[in-house]
Structure formats: C-alpha cells, structure tokens
Image: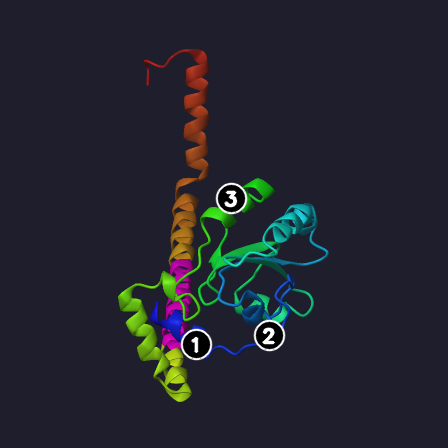
Amino acid sequence: MRLVLVLALFCATYNIPAGASSVTKDSVESVAKDRPVFLKFFAPWCGHCKAMAPDWSRLMTDFKDSDTVFVGEVDCTADGKDLCSDVGVQGYPTIKYGDLTDLQDYKGARSYEAMKKHADTAIKPQCSFERLSLCTEEQKKELEEIRALSASELSKLIQVEEEKISTAEKDFELGVQDLQAKYAALQQTKEETLSIIKTPRFAMLKSAIKQKNANGDKNEL
C-alpha cells in the first residue's frame, strides 16, 4: 500500500485527452488519472485479438465517461511497445487490470458479458490523494507523511521497493532453474533404469506370459 501511495504522488502528469483509449507508456498515467484500469495488450496481426476486438470496443464505449474505471488498449507493435515490455506481456491478447503500479492478469472469459461484469464488480478505485473519501484514517495519516517527503526521499523509497521486486524475480528464476535441473536429473535416472529393465529378457518374459494366457494355462504360473 505504501508503495502505491508513494508512486501515486511521485508519478509525472501528461496532457492527454481524458477520452483517449489507445495508450502508451508515456500517456497511460495521465489518461487513467487516479482510476484503476482495464487494459488489453494486443498486436494488430493477432487472430484472437481481431476476434475479441468488437467486444472490447463495446466495453471501451461503455466506460468512456466513467470516473471509476479506465478501459483502454495498448498496441504492442507500435507506440505501446515499451508499456507492454514493462508489464511483462508475452502473448496476445493479454488483459490486465487494477492499479497501474500493481496490474493483475485477467483470467476470465473474453466475452463482452464476462468482461463487462468484471469491470463493474471487480475493479474498484483505491485510496489516493484524489480520492480521500475512500481512505481510512490510518491511510490518510500515511498520505500526509508521504506528502511531507521530498522528491529525493520518495525516489529512495521507490528504489528500495523496486530492488525487493527485482530480488523476488531473480529468486524465482533461480528456483525455476533448480527445478529444471532436478527434473533433468530425474528424467535421466528414469531412462537409465528403464534401459536396464527393458532388456531382451524382459521382452521374452512378457512374450511368455502372453502366450500362456492365450493358451489358458494361467494356473501353471
């Protein structure tokens, strides 16, 4: 929560029309203002992107004048490329929602009805300097403490949190590498064991039992 509040105060403001729906790294904060977002990251050549385009356009129209949720799209092959990279987009279309400093992956159905319901019920504004009515007394106190910090102090706080994120990502990558190494070792052990078991003698044993079963002399076994 503290990081969100720090970033909300520290982020720069850009002069972009409030009605814009196609956003970039430079414009998204200004367009979204203090609203949570619902963003589709796409590539124009993507077949699935084209298929859902009418429903997403309808959704953007529905929320065009909303003061609680911003619905937009990001072209990852054009000016939105940097934003797509920053939020970790790896395939198209990718849909994310929530606070700009903590976007979550949307994993629901991609029909108009499902996305509209999600936007209506699951995406809510958060406490911020612009929405003090949503803040608890404790959050208001924290906001005032943050407001009193200098730009340099804010930068240092953000850097500390970013380093924590970077460390977590590196730990995850190392963990995945360790799991892959263990998997490879287990796979090799399995293959070596099978190569020992599956000898010509093993094939002969199976052939013999098959023959005896076919001849009806199971009791002999």
Write the start and end of the magenta stretch as one range.
Answer: 161-181
- The alpha-carbon separation of the residues under discs 3 and 2 comes to 29 Å
* Position of residue 79 measured from the top left corner of the image (x, y, whole percent): 67, 70
- Residue 26's mark? 2
Question: Quadrant of residue 208 in the image?
Answer: top left
Circles 3 and 2: CB atoms closer than 8 Å: no
User: What colouring method underlies this structural image?
Assistant: rainbow
Query: 197 or 158: which is nearer to us?
Result: 158
* Position of residue 115 measured from the top left corner of the image (x, y, whole percent): 55, 46
- The alpha-carbon separation of the residues under discs 2 and 1 comes to 16 Å
Q: Secondary structure at mark 1?
A: helix
Q: Is residue 111 visible?
A: no
Identified by mark 2, the residue type is Asp
**Residue occupying the point 64% across, 61% down:** 21
**Residue occupying the point 44% across, 69% down:** 130
Q: Quadrant of the C terminus?
A: top left
Tell me the mark number nearer the camera, choosing from 3 and 2.
Answer: 3
Identified by mark 1, the residue type is Leu
Image position of 177 with respect to 150: above or below: above
Query: 25 or 171: which is nearer to us?
Result: 25
Confirm whether the magenta stretch covers residue 178: yes
Image position of 83 with respect to 192: above or below: below
Q: Secondary structure at mark 2?
A: loop
Q: Badge 2: how crowded within 10 Å, few (<14), some, or many (20+)?
A: some
Q: Quadrant of the N terminus?
A: bottom left
Tell me the mark number nearer the camera, choosing from 2 and 1.
Answer: 1
Label 3, on which residue? 117
Label 1, on which residue? 9
Whichever of callouts 3 and 1 sits on the residue coming sooner in the sequence is 1
- The alpha-carbon separation of the residues under discs 3 and 1 comes to 30 Å
For residue 129, side relative to residue 24 (left or right): left
